[in-house]
């Protein structure tokens, strides 16, 4: 809704109005986490719960997520 209210409906010059984020490739575990998180936003997500789902320790999840995306899991 915010995008609708703030953004013009058309952008000149063939430039995309919005660019959908693309999951990083290469680390299938992290790609699966990135796909899983938006599907479970109705649940209380913590680093521990995401780690349990991905079968990774929180330390490994943090390290591999940052390496794949350049940002933290719970950013």
Image (cartoon, helix red, strand yellow):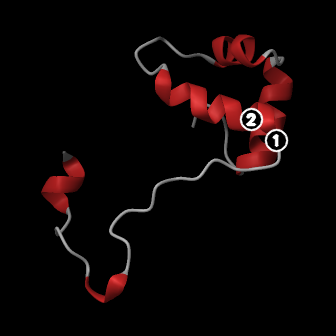
Q: CA distance from mark 2 to mark 1?
A: 5 Å
Would you say 2 lies left or right of 45 here? left
Residue at (34, 83) in percent of width and height: 14
Q: Quadrant of the C terminus?
A: top right
Q: Residue at x 46, y 11 (%)?
A: 43
Disc 1 residue crowd, few under 14, some 14–19, many 20+, Cα 10 Å: few
Q: Residue furthest left?
A: 5
For residue 30, which numbered disc appears in the image?
Answer: 2
Tell me: 24 left or right of 27: left
Q: Residues within 10 Å of mark 2 (few under 14, many from 20)?
A: many
Q: Which mark is residue 59?
A: none
Badge 1 element: loop
Horizontal placement of 52 versus 38: left or right? right
The picture quadrant where one finds residue 33 is: top right
In this rendering, the answer to whether 30 lies above or below 5 is: above
Q: Quadrant of the N terminus?
A: top left
> How many numbered badges does the structure rendering display?
2
Q: Is 24 left or right of 45, judged from the image as shown?
A: right
Q: Residue at x 70, y 49 (%)?
A: 69
Instruction: Tell me where residue 55 appears, x and y as whole percent.
Output: 80, 15
Residue 27, disc: 1
Residue 30 position in % (x across, y down): 74, 35
Judge by depth and name the residue closer to the eye, 8 or 66: 8
| Residue 47 x %, y % | 66, 19
> For the point 20% across and 74% down, which residue is it?
10
Query: At which x and y percent is residue 65?
Result: 75, 38
Q: Measured along the vertical axis of the image, is residue 69 above or below residue 52?
A: below
Q: Are marks 2 and 1 in contact (CB under 8 Å)?
A: yes
| Badge 2 element | helix
Q: Residue furthest bottom?
A: 13
């Amino acid at each position: 809704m915010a995008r609708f209210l703030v953004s013009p409906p058309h952008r000149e010059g063939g430039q995309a109005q919005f660019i959908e984020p693309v999951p990083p490739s290469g680390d299938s575990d992290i790609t699966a986490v990135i796909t899983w998180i938006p599907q479970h936003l109705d649940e209380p997500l913590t680093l521990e719960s995401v780690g349990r789902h991905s079968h990774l320790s929180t330390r490994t999840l943090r390290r591999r997520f940052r390496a794949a995306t350049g940002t933290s899991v719970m950013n």
